[in-house]
Image (cartoon, rainbow, N blue to C red):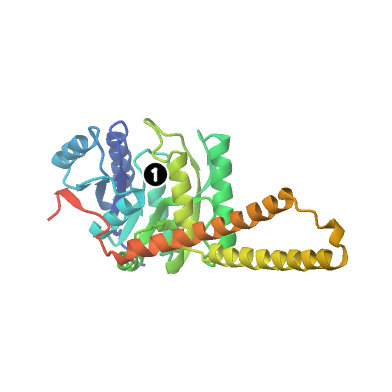
Amino acid sequence: MASEKPFLSVVVPVFNEELTIEKMYERVKKALEEDALTFEIIIVNDGSYDSTVEKVKRLCSIDNRVKLVSFSRNFGHQIAISAGLDKSRGQVVVIIDADLQDPPELIPKMIKMWENGCEVVYAVRKKRKGDSFFKRFTAALFYRTLRILSPVEIPLDAGDFRLLDRKVVDVLKRMRERSRFVRGMVSWIGFRQGKIEYVREKRIAGETKYPLRKMISFAIDGILSFSNLPLRLSSAFGFIAAVISFILLLYGIWIKVFYPSKTIPGWTSLFVVILFFSGIQLVCIGILGEYVGRAYEECKKRPLYIVDEEVNFD
């Protein structure tokens, strides 16, 4: 890689971060200036309805290295990251959230790994402060389930906090699928990847933007975007159900022929069989529906996002 310091783009997706945005700016600026880096900070407003936009505009007015991309509505965290990558100009790009759970002070270390040849540097959480046992457990379960299901090796316990070389960003910009799972997309692209471990801090203020409902939706996107194993499992369920039904059919004929006196009509066995096969059918149809729904969204070819306003872009 280059011997001199690269120009760096820092992409920050935000949604209702009025309590954290100024502190995030100060810490990012301090960390990068201490390392003598030239940089831009691209803040992507994902439809905030608090005073986040006003505070970002104030930062833009005092520092032209801060740039604002504001969406017309909420399009989602992963799409906000993609918009920041689309607008970035740096030789390297770092993705970081505004809640400061991921420390900006790690960025210079990431740059050094890039200078040593890594084209992707992802941060692995070796400890998560402030997260409940339920969130830690479900996060660990998700990453390990995804690793089993997906043919792409996605790093365990690594979020979106990472550094990307420009050629990685250019490839990501050509990938326009709507159900986006950026960390999986980066793993799929390949190139030389390295990791850096850190302790994830508590949010400095505000509330998490990933409640249980969004976490479940995010997990489904990740699994369905990088694995067709659920479809294969639905086929397996159908085959198993067919085998069981054939065995029951043979059993029924055998009883009817050799033990006609025992063929007393009963609703219990009928109820159990109907419930079992109906359940399998509904599960399989549901899995098919998820994939078909995603194919339908892709076919409409709508833009990933709509920009309402930009500030400090040439």
> Is residue 150 something one can see in this rendering?
no
Would residue 47 be found to the left or right of residue 193 on screen? left
Q: Residue furthest front?
A: 261
Q: Is residue 51 or residue 62 the one in the foreground?
A: 51
> Is residue 49 something one can see in this rendering?
yes
User: Whole-percent x and y of residue 221?
Assistant: 44, 55
User: Whole-percent x and y of residue 169?
Assistant: 33, 63
For disc 1, the marked residue is 105
Q: Quadrant of the C terminus?
A: bottom left
Would residue 219 be found to the left or right of residue 40 on screen? right
Q: Residue at x 46, y 37 (%)?
A: 201
Q: Residue at x 81, y 65 (%)?
A: 256
- Tag 1: residue type? Glu
Q: Is residue 73 or residue 237 the one in the foreground?
A: 237
Q: Quadrant of residue 236?
A: bottom right
Q: Residues within 10 Å of mark 1 (few under 14, many from 20)?
A: some
